[in-house]
Amino acid sequence: MQLKLKNFTKTFDSTTVIDGMDLTVNDGEMMALLGPSGCGKSTTLFTICGIHRMNGGTLHFGDREVSNLPSQQRNVGVVFQNYALYPHMDIRDNIAFPLRVQKLDSTTIARKVKEIAELVHIPELLDRRPAQLSGGQQQRVALARALVRKPDVLLLDEPLANLDAKLRLEMRSEIRRIQLETGITAILVTHDQVEAMSMCDRIALMKDGKIVQLSEPSEMYNNPSNVFVAGFLGNPPISFVKAQVQGDDFGFGNNRVAVAPGLKFRVGGALQLGIRPEHFGPQFGRDVQGKISFVENQGREDLYNVTLENGVVIRSIQPAGTRLKLGETVSWGVSSENVLTFDLQGARL
């Protein structure tokens, strides 16, 4: 089921939160609405499911306009951050609840509950109560309840926020597996870039109620449209350095980064360089000098901050065992082919 928002506007009192947004989610696609708190991503999700009403624009599910329909007539499944399970019901009844609202017969309900419980790998939990389950198990129940009535669209509002790191990793792959197996159109709201990049076909990165960039995860990471996008994706984050064009080099202080072949910039022009940590290190030469100001061992890799003479910090990821010490002076290089360039206002060059 394709979902299309056209010229979507949402206001609260006199404050406009979303102004004229266009967004199309393709049939069977999983789309991430990614961005910082207050950017409008949850407002968009709640409008799609009918909790909020639109102040302008239209919403279509396939050929059907649902802009003014109440939520119960939109056929959407919603999974909330806090699971929202009924504590007095067992898991079987929690999952069956939407089917009972539809007044299906008991035989059909039992069959559908059994099928969806097997899909989300919880058939052995059906006789328990929510309080007897772990956070990951409750999240699977919430997914089963949202999917059991075969909605046209699945909406996920920060579904992994309350899970620990190991469970988040497990549930990322599980939610994606279930979405692919069912072929349902899905929208994930998250502020976590790793969730968005690992789970979704495309990402709509939002800021101040607008979509700043809409593209596939790898394209957004490798080809960001501005410094906000470049800075939002990546962990450890990208480093930004102000530089001048000096012939075939970008210069900052006594440091040099070669301009990649085929790129032309005005000599003497000022710009910003975006350097990702995987593209800065001894394997790329020795044109940038600084001191190690931070070291973090992460097992299979070491993270370093290198502070330059002018106080600018460039981050680096190196293989585990490099074992450099705080205060040690290094001369490293930058992969010129992977340097991102931006003007001083932050737009991509």
Image (cartoon, rainbow, N blue to C red):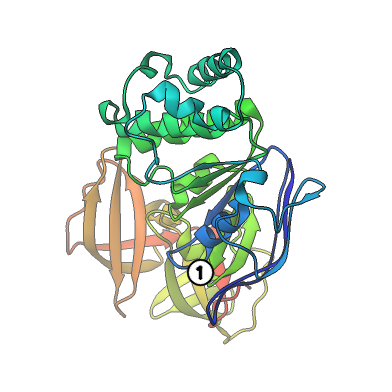
Q: Say whether residue 219 is visible.
A: no
| Residue in front for this viewpoint, 291 or 179 | 179
In this picture, residue 158 sits left or right of residue 73: left
Residue 13 position (above or below residue 5): below
**Residue ID at (59%, 75%):** 347
Q: Say whether residue 186 is visible.
A: yes
**Residue ID at (45%, 34%):** 142
Residue 272 position (above or below residue 31): below
In this picture, residue 1 sits left or right of residue 233: right
| Residue in front for this viewpoint, 122 or 273 | 122
Residue 315 falls in image quadrant: bottom left
| Residue in front for this viewpoint, 272 or 182 | 182
In this view, the residue farthest toward the bottom is: 268
User: Where does the C terminus fall, quadrant-wise?
Assistant: bottom right
Residue 341 falls in image quadrant: bottom right
**Residue ID at (29%, 30%):** 134
Q: Position of residue 89 (x, y in %)?
A: 36, 28
Q: Position of residue 27 (x, y in %)?
A: 73, 40
Q: The residue tagged with tag 1: helix, strand or loop? A: helix
Q: Which residue is mark 1?
A: 228
Q: Position of residue 160 (x, y in %)?
A: 40, 42
